[in-house]
């Protein structure tokens, strides 16, 4: 059974790699963005307990999966179930360029314009990856990578 977690900064290539692995190995795919946030005008995180239930439900109903996201707190919930982790540790400029060239994500945004309206904020947020001290930070991702005792790899770039 394959149970893979992919994590890294926004724009690192997590979704791209997850989709490639999903297709190649017939895995079920969970994008943590879809269960981390409340459905509201102002983005607000769901309570961790609520997201945890969603993650546990996904894991219990799928035997082979790939989970991807930048949320260390959510990744830690899935970590004991994983057979492999992949840390995409792309440089900041690569992440920014990926976001600038990202196609419309209809599962996250109603329109391409709505997605593009968030781009400036997203770029500023990406730039803070190395200096932040939160669940989205390089520091948190390195801690998860160090914690995991199973098969793991750290890559610098995903071919898009």
Image: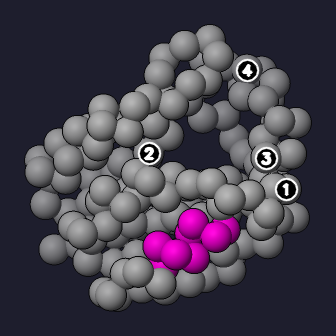
Mark closer to the chain start, 1 or 2: 2
Residue shown at 51%/31% (left/top)? Answer: 45
Residue shown at 57%/76% (left/top)? Answer: 142
Mark closer to the chain start, 3 or 4: 4
Which residue carries the number 2 mark? 32
Q: Residue furthest front?
A: 133
Secondary element at image label 4: helix
| Residue 147, quarter of picture | bottom left
Disc assigned to residue 114:
4
Secondary element at image label 3: helix
Disc assigned to residue 125:
3
Task: Report how far apart the C-alphas of labels 3 and 4 lie in the structure.
Answer: 17 Å
Disc assigned to residue 127:
1
Task: Report how far apart the C-alphas of labels 3 and 1 lie in the structure.
Answer: 5 Å
Secondary element at image label 1: helix
Mark closer to the chain start, 4 or 2: 2
Task: Report how far apart the C-alphas of labels 1 and 4 lie in the structure.
Answer: 21 Å
Task: Report how far apart the C-alphas of labels 4 and 2 lie in the structure.
Answer: 20 Å
| Residue 140, quarter of picture | bottom right
Q: Are marks 3 and 1 in contact (CB under 8 Å)?
A: yes
Q: Position of residue 18 (x, y in %)?
A: 45, 61
42 on left or right of 23: right
Instruction: Tally the marks.
Output: 4
């Amino acid at each position: 059974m394959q149970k893979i977690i992919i994590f890294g900064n926004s724009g690192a290539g997590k979704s791209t790699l997850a989709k490639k692995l999903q297709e190649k190995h017939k895995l079920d795919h969970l994008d943590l963005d879809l269960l981390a946030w409340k459905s509201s005008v102002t983005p607000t995180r769901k309570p961790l307990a609520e997201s945890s239930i969603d993650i546990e439900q996904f894991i219990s109903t799928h035997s082979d999966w790939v989970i991807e996201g930048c949320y260390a707190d959510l990744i830690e919930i899935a970590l004991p179930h994983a057979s492999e982790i992949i840390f995409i540790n792309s440089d900041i400029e690569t992440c920014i360029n990926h976001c600038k060239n990202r196609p419309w994500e209809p599962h996250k945004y109603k329109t391409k314009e709505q997605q593009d309206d968030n781009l400036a904020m997203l770029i500023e947020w990406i730039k803070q990856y190395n200096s932040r001290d939160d669940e989205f930070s390089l520091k948190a991702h390195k801690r998860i990578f160090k914690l995991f005792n199973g098969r793991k790899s750290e890559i610098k770039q995903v071919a898009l």
